[in-house]
Image: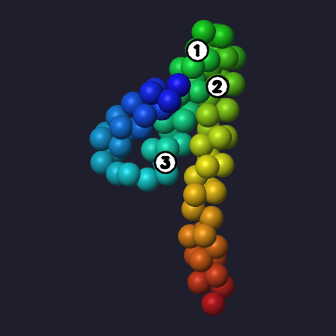
């Protein structure tokens, strides 16, 4: 799964021309979907949701300080 995630991340980054958290979330979602693709459509959906959730939480954790700073500046 790690190799798939990395490959998806590189392809998405090159396609979009940007390096941001959206790439991370998309790569995680696609990896989960492909990893569980042998389980039919329900497996694909579950894998995608799991990948989306895990990478979404990672992106939030990774940017927590930045988000707190943005909220503090907006309240001034």
Who comes first in sequence, dot 2 or dot 3?
3
In the picture provided, is 72 more to the left or to the right than 16? right
Image vertical order of residue 30 relative to residue 69, above or below: above
Question: How is the protein colored in the picture?
Answer: rainbow
Residue at figure coordinates x 60%, y 9% from the top left:
38
SS under mark 1: helix
Image vertical order of residue 31 relative to residue 61, above or below: above
Q: Position of residue 26 (x, y in %)?
A: 50, 38
Residue at figure coordinates x 35%, y 34% from the top left:
11
Badge 3: residue crowd in 10 Å (few <14, some 14–19, many ≥20): some
Q: Nearer the viewer, residue 5 or 18?
A: 5
Q: Nearer the viewer, residue 21 or 42?
A: 21
Q: Position of residue 73 (x, y in %)?
A: 59, 84
Image vertical order of residue 63 relative to residue 47, above or below: below
Q: Which residue is mark 2?
A: 47
Q: Which residue is mark 3?
A: 22
- Residues under numbered marks 2 and 3 in contact, where contact means CB atoms less than 8 Å apart: no
In the picture provided, is 52 more to the left or to the right than 2? right
Estimate the spatial distance between the alpha carbons at disc 2 and disc 3, rounded to whole Å: 18 Å
Residue farthest to the front? 2
Q: Which residue is mark 1?
A: 37
Q: Position of residue 3 (x, y in %)?
A: 45, 27
Name the quadrant of the C terminus.
Answer: bottom right
Residue at figure coordinates x 35%, y 43% from the top left:
13
Toward which corner of the image does residue 60 lie, by quadrant?
Answer: bottom right
Badge 1: residue crowd in 10 Å (few <14, some 14–19, many ≥20): some
Estimate the spatial distance between the alpha carbons at disc 1 and disc 3, rounded to whole Å: 22 Å
Residue at figure coordinates x 54%, y 42% from the top left:
25
How many numbered callouts? 3
């Amino acid at each position: 799964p790690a190799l798939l995630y990395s490959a998806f991340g590189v392809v998405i980054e090159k396609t979009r021309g940007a390096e941001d958290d959206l790439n991370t979330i998309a790569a995680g979602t696609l990896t989960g979907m492909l990893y569980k693709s042998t389980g039919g459509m329900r497996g694909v959906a579950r894998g995608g949701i799991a990948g989306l959730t895990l990478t979404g939480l990672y992106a939030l954790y990774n940017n927590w300080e930045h988000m707190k700073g943005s909220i503090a500046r907006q309240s001034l």
